[in-house]
Image: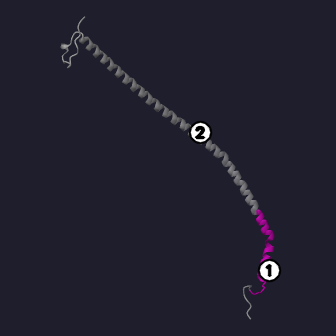
Amino acid sequence: LPTVRPPSPAPSSSASSLTPLERPLRSIAAQGIATLLDAEKEASQIVAKAREYRNQRLKDARGEASKEIEQLRAKKEADFKEFENQHSGDSSSSQDEVNKATQEALAKIEASFEENREKVVKDLLERVVQVNPALHRNLEARS
């Protein structure tokens, strides 16, 4: 069996000082590091693609949500206009009823006025012409 030397305390910078067993280990370690670096690079690309995909999906979702909001807003506005049109006719018919009731009340008042006009004028003239001199109740009689 070949004897394995213990690792030296300070690594040497030259590759020629390596033993024949250490050289393949260094080569394998370098290949492993290169493989790990490639894997890390590939993983970062996958993560970047995933982020890009997520961002695109978020943009698409926002666009769809805004379209749905606009559709809902348009539907609600149309419903409101329809409701308003249905009930605005009710207010005009209600207004017509109020106007009719007002005209009837005014007609009654005018008829009552015409009916009682002569009597009221006669009573007013009678009160104005009739003079009943009397002392005021607060005035004391002086002796």
Residue 138, percent across and down?
Answer: 72, 85
Residue 47, percent across and down?
Answer: 39, 25
Numbered label attached to residue 126: 1
The residue at the point 73 percent across, 54 percent down is 97
Left or right: residue 37 versus residue 10 is right
> Closer to the camera, 14 or 136?
14
Instruction: Please check the rendered image and state whether residue 131 is part of the magenta-colored stretch, yes or no.
Output: yes
The scheme the figure's colours follow is one colour
Of all residues, the one furthest to the top in this rendering is 1
Residue 74, percent across and down?
Answer: 57, 40
Quadrant where the C terminus sits is: bottom right
Query: Residue 114, located in which quarter of the rendered image?
Result: bottom right
Instruction: Please check the rendered image and state whether residue 129 is part of the magenta-colored stretch, yes or no.
Output: yes
Left or right: residue 43 versus residue 84 is left
What stretch of residues is rendered in magenta?
Answer: 107-135
Q: Amino acid at mark 1?
A: Glu
Tell me which secondary structure the magenta stretch mostly adopts.
Answer: helix
The residue at the point 52 percent across, 35 percent down is 67
The residue at the point 29 percent across, 13 percent down is 28
Residue 43, percent across and down?
Answer: 37, 22
Query: Residue 50, located in which quarter of the rendered image?
Result: top left
The residue at the point 21 percent across, 11 percent down is 19
Residues at circles 2 and 1 in contact by the CB criterion of under 8 Å? no
**What residue is shown with label 2?**
75
Q: Amino acid at mark 2?
A: Lys
First in sequence, mark 2 or 1: give its number.
2
Q: Residues within 10 Å of mark 1 (few under 14, many from 20)?
A: few
Q: Is residue 102 above or below residue 51?
A: below
